[in-house]
Every structure is written in C-alpha cells, then in structure tokens.
Image (cartoon, helix red, strand yellow):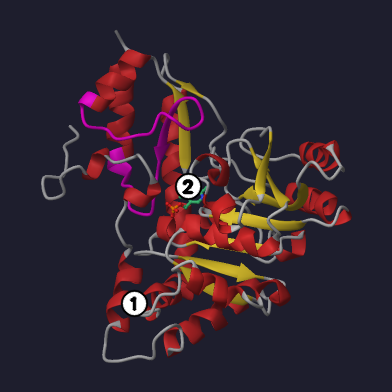
Amino acid sequence: MLTRNPDQPGYFLQFASDNSAGICPEALEAFNRANAGFAASYGNDESTAEVCKSLRRLFDADAEIFFVFNGTAANSTALASLCQSYQAVICSDIAHVETDECGAPEFFSNGSKLLSSPSRQGKLTSNGVLDVITRRTDVHYPRPKVVTLTQSTELGTVYQTGEISGIAKVAREHGLKVHMDGARFANAIAALNVSPAEITWKAGVDVLCFGGTKMGLPIGEAIVFFDRRLGEEFAYRCKQAGQLASKMRFLSAPWLSMIRDNVWLTHASHANAMARQLADKIARISGAELLLPTQANGVFVNLPPHARERLQAKGWAFYTFIGGGARFMCSWATKEAAIEHLAHDIEQSVSC
Ligand SMILES: *Cc1c(COP(=O)(O)O)cnc(C)c1O
C-alpha cells in the first residue's frame, strides 16, 4: 500500500513544475561552502571565476558568461542585447517568452516585437521561421533580427541537433541571431546523446540562457554568449535591469557542484526517467490519453474534467494551462514511489 511521507507534507503531490522541488544536495553544499568568510562582491570573487572557467570547458568555447536571478530576466536581457527596438524576435506561439514573461522581452528591448510562428509539438520549424522572415520586408513591419527556440521545449519535447542547425541556417542566411531558452537545457542534454557544444554553438546558437533553477540550484540562470562580441556591454544591461547580484558567489558557486562529475546530467536523467515511467503507466490507463511524446521531464495528458477535479481534490498539484491538458513535471527530487502513487490515483480518477 502506498503512503504519503508524513515528514514532508505535500512531497508526493507536487507535479506542477520542476521548480517546486527544493535545492539538490550538491548545490546546497556548495551554497553553504560559499558562505564561509568574506569574498569580493559583484562577481569579482573566486567562485564566480572558477564557475565561468568550468562552463567554458563544458561548452568547449571561450564564451562570455553572466549570472542572473531568473529565466525571465535571462531571456529578456539576452534578447534585448541582440536587437534594436524596431527589430523583432521570432518565437514559437507557445514559447515562454511569448506566453509567460509578462511582456518582459518587449519591455527590456524597448519594444522589439515578438513574432510568433506555429509550433509543431512545441518546436519551431525552419519553414515556419522562413515564413515569418519573408512575410514582409517593408518599413511598416518590424524587421526580424533574432530567432529564439526553447530546449527542451515547453511541451516536453526535444530538438534534435539537425533541427536546430536547420533553423540556425535559415536565420544566418537572413542575418538573424539565434537565442536558446535553456530553462530545461539539462533535460535536453540528458535526453540526447550529444555534447553541450554540438547542440549549441556548433549548431549555430549564439546565446544560451542555461537554466539553473529547474535543475536543482537554489536560484539563478547563466547566460552564455558564445560570440563574445555580443556580450561586450552586457554587464551594463544586467546592472540596469537590477540583475547584478552583489553577493554573486551565491548565484555562481552552486553551479560548480553541478558541473563537477556531471551531477547536472545525473539529476536531469533522473527527472527524465521519472517522466518516462509516468508516461508508460498512463499509456496503459484507458480514459487517460498522452498528448505528446515524453522526451524530457514533462508528461502531458488529456484527462476528463471529473478526473482532473478528483486528482486536485486528493491534493495533486499540476498545471492545466499549458499544452491543452494536464501537465505533470518531474524533477531531480521526484521519487519512484510518487510516480506509482500518482499513476494509481490517475487510474482511479478516470474511472467512473
Ligand atoms: C521556467 C521557465 C523559464 C524561466 O522562468 P522564471 O520563472 O522567470 O525563472 C523560462 N523559459 C521556460 C521555457 C521555462 O519553463
């Protein structure tokens, strides 16, 4: 018989987002270690220098790297640095920048318009991007200057390397830069058998917002400019946007513990495996229908309204405003027992 963990109320029930999990032990240990004594502020400390060095090694690139507080700030300031206010950013119609950032990309870029392209299972297509680029060339329409794609996507799917390089090729041919929203970059790398370099700069990505929060850090994301020139004045933009942490070591140091021994990939692989298990169990439940392929750490399922209500009444937390169904997100902290328990309750809830 499955029971809830009495020491951790709600522990089993939380599938709303991967950011509902806590800090993973390795990151917490590094965070505490960074707390010893004094350190130079505003990123001039040793931990920050060391993390930047190890991220450069990880990506095999002499990248310019910055740390900010969250993903909205990372995306918005990075995109703003890539275009003028009269230029535009092409994104998928379900992109986080389009639907979940409260206009921050437009705000930080002083008005650069987001132009959306229909997504196919969460992904942009090179034809879709080309359509937007060539739609208009007159002065009355904002000029596309950046393509942004999300890896892994908002719908739990993953771009293959060829899909990214195809989009980047179209972008480059028309003078556009490529930005990657990597809030769940770790889950994508864990799902694909590729190196971080292959799926980013080698595939044509100019700037990556590398998500830390959802993979187990206490807070913060890294912005990686593979083309250093694009990041030249970014420090000023960060400061102006209120994104320059004075105690930077607490944003940066936890990254070290994640990169070391590939801890980030171990955790992300676990999250992906939990999602896979849940998807496999749901596939066997009649009355519950998987809406999308489960390629990373999210499971999207069509449940009848009465089932959603029953699950929520039992305390299960999940979103229903993304992807047209119920979204269950797994994280580094998701336990196998919780997956069994959830699948059991889903089965019960769909039956009349
Ligand atoms: C979570 C998420 C972000 C970052 O969101 P914040 O709440 O601002 O940290 C960005 N993009 C995607 C696709 C996300 O899922």
- Total labels drawn: 2
Residue 16: % across, % down? 35, 39
Q: Quadrant of residue 212?
A: bottom left
In the displayed structure, 200 sits above or below 248; it is above
Distance between mark 1 and mark 2 Cα atoms: 24 Å
Q: Is residue 294 visible?
A: yes
Confirm whether the magenta stretch covers residue 312. Answer: no
| Residue extending furthest toward the front | 140
Residue behind mark 1: 30
Confirm whether the magenta stretch covers residue 336. Answer: yes
| Residue extending furthest toward the top | 352
Residue at position x 27%, y 25% from top?
311
Q: Amino acid at mark 2?
A: Asn
Residue 272, label in figure: 2
Q: Amino acid at mark 1?
A: Ala
Residues shaded magenta: 313-338
Regarding mark 2 in the picture, which secondary structure is present there? helix
- Badge 1: few (under 14), some or many (20 or more) residues near its Cα, within 10 Å? many
- Badge 2: few (under 14), some or many (20 or more) residues near its Cα, within 10 Å? many
**Quadrant of the snapshot with the C terminus:** top left
Residue 290: % across, % down? 50, 25
Residue at position x 56%, y 77% from top?
235
Regarding mark 1 in the picture, which secondary structure is present there? helix
